[in-house]
Image (tube, rainbow, N blue to C red):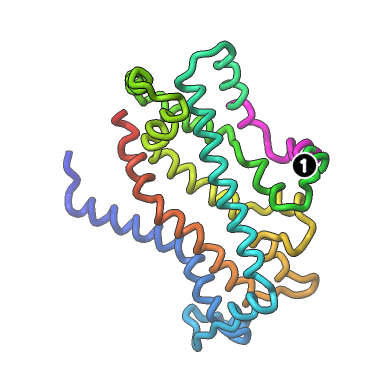
Amino acid sequence: MTPSKSQKILTYVLLITFSALWLFPVLWIFLSSFKSNSELYQFPPTFLPQQFTIEHFVNAFEKGNFGKYFLNSAIVAITSTVLLLLINSMAGYALAKYKFKGGTFILLAFISTLMIPLEVIMIPIFKVLSFLGLYNSLLALIIPPAATPTGVFMLRQYLLTIPNELIEAARIDGAGEWKIYWRIILPLCQPILAALAIFSFMWRWDDFLWPLIAISDPSKYTVQLALSNFIGEFNVDWGSLLAMSVITMIPVLIVFLIFQKHLVNSMATSGMK
């Protein structure tokens, strides 16, 4: 049954309304970052800045050393995402296409860890990192999330849709296992890898709790820890906090724009495999 014109109009109105309500806080933060300190505390508050200023951005980078924190987060997010894609794709490929004793048990063990809260395993992970001498280093933020059960499961399920005959044909042509992995598996997994890259980068970039535990040296802080520096015991530097909150949104948006085509293709074709 084809919807009528009035139904379409009502649908678009509802979608636009809910989108506006969802985007309003983000837009408010963006516009407030360009307001002066006096205007931030003005009552009643103004939506648009009466006079645009970038003083909060300048203060945060010059006085707050935010450039260093930004670089730390970029190193952690990019490196851990690359490692996650490599390790999870290998594990997913092995669980999907290799038949070996105990494979089902290993898969169930991976999936069962999804039911364990992060707070439960934080102490064991912390002790292992301390034993290895990785505490208070960026490696403490990169190595633990290098393999996730979610990523292994997603890739394993996606690789099950790839015909085994394709891999067998490559073996008959003389291709080794590594060549099959690099030349066939990874290119065919681009949609799911793009989706996982977006999630991984976002998780690592926005992570606060684990960096708070694993890092004590202020020079190795990530952006999320750095944002807490603008919150003092008796006052909050709202101008710098808002400005840096806007800056921290940009990398995630860039990553999404880069991989969105593959993500959309993955969602559009998921029901056709």
Q: Say whether residue 271 is left or right of residue 214.
A: left
**SS under mark 1:** helix
Q: Residue at x 47, y 80 (%)?
A: 48
Residue at figure coordinates x 47%, y 69% from the top left:
27
Q: Which residues are magenta?
A: 111-127
Taking the image as shown, residue 4 lies to the left or right of residue 273, namely left
Q: Look at the picture and state if 51 lies above or below 106.
A: below
Q: Quadrant of residue 133?
A: top right
Examine the structure image and report whether residue 122 is included in the region drawn in magenta.
Answer: yes
Tell me how many marks there are.
Answer: 1
Look at the image and tell me whether residue 209 can be seen. no
Residue located at (46% from left, 22% from top): 96
Residue 209 placement (x, y as % from top left): 70, 51
Asked whether 141 or 113 is in front, the reply is 141
In this view, the residue farthest toward the front is: 174
Give the residue number, with chain letter if any, for mark 1: 129
Image position of 128 with respect to 98: above or below: below
Q: Position of residue 80 (x, y in %)?
A: 59, 46
Tell me which secondary structure the magenta stretch mostly adopts: helix
Write down the quadrant of residue 145 in the picture: top right
Instruction: From this view, report whether residue 102 is shown above or below residue 152.
Output: above
Q: In the rendered view, does 218 fall on the left or right side of 192?
A: right
Disc 1 residue type (three-letter): Leu
Assign the C terminus to one quadrant of the image: top left
Q: x%, y% of residue 162?
A: 36, 26
Q: Nearer the viewer, residue 114 or 189?
A: 189
